[in-house]
Amino acid sequence: MAGKFGIVVNTPTEPSQLFAGDYRGLINVTIAAGQGAAIPRGLVLQRNAGTGKYEVLIPGTGAAVAVLASSEPVDATADIVVPILRQGPVRGADLQWGAATAPQKVTHTQQLIDAGVLVVS
């Protein structure tokens, strides 16, 4: 029985919930080498049309298509296979945008939605 006398005891949660619902379309993909040593969970990604590998989004020029779903930061100094979210809802507050400006975030958020990643508040 949780709590006494109708009192509910809340358990701590992790700071980044990232996923905003139960439905998740996760797939494993290759992150291209040279992306960095500590790519954080929730980072918005683009796909390189030439290689088919995923990369850190270049704000204003790339197209946002996925979100890094790894539970730990990823070392992408070499090619690495990691889980990404290609479909499903995510919490907008937990997305990592790098150096994107507010107008770029609006544009890239719409790109994520168009790609099947619903961004919720």
Image (spheres, rainbow, N blue to C red):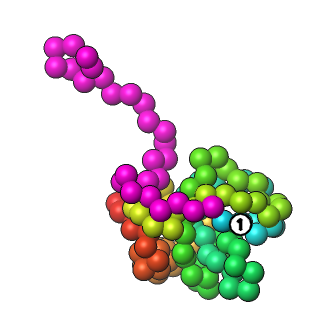
Q: Is any atom of residue 96 visible in this view?
A: no
From the top left corner, tell me how far across and down residue 30 is, in percent: 71, 66
Q: How many marks?
A: 1
Image-based side of 107 in relation to 70, left or right = left
- Residue at x 54%, y 75% (from the top left corner): 65
- Residue at x 64%, y 46% (from the top left corner): 72
From the top left corner, tell me how far across and down residue 52 is, in percent: 70, 79
Q: Which quarter of the rendered picture does the N terminus lie within?
A: top left
Q: Amino acid at mark 1?
A: Thr
Name the chief secondary structure element in magenta: loop
Image-based side of 17 in relation to 100, left or right = left
Quarter of the image for residue 87 reads bottom left
Q: Which quarter of the rendered picture does the C terminus lie within?
A: bottom left
Looking at the image, which residue sits at the far top?
A: 4
Q: Is any atom of residue 38 visible in this view?
A: yes
* SS for dot 1: strand
Residue at the spot of label 1: 30
- Residue at x 37%, y 52% (from the top left corner): 22
Q: Is residue 64 above or below residue 15?
A: below
- Residue at x 76%, y 69% (from the top left corner): 32
From the top left corner, tell me how far across and down residue 117 is, in percent: 44, 69
Image-based side of 76 in relation to 6, left or right = right
From the top left corner, tell me how far across and down residue 101 is, in percent: 53, 74
Residue 9 magenta-drawn? yes
Q: Which residues are magenta?
A: 1-28
Few, some or many residues within 10 Å of mark 1 (<14, 14–19, 20+): some
Quarter of the image for residue 33 reads bottom right
Looking at the image, which residue sits at the far left?
A: 5
Q: Is residue 8 above or below residue 91?
A: above
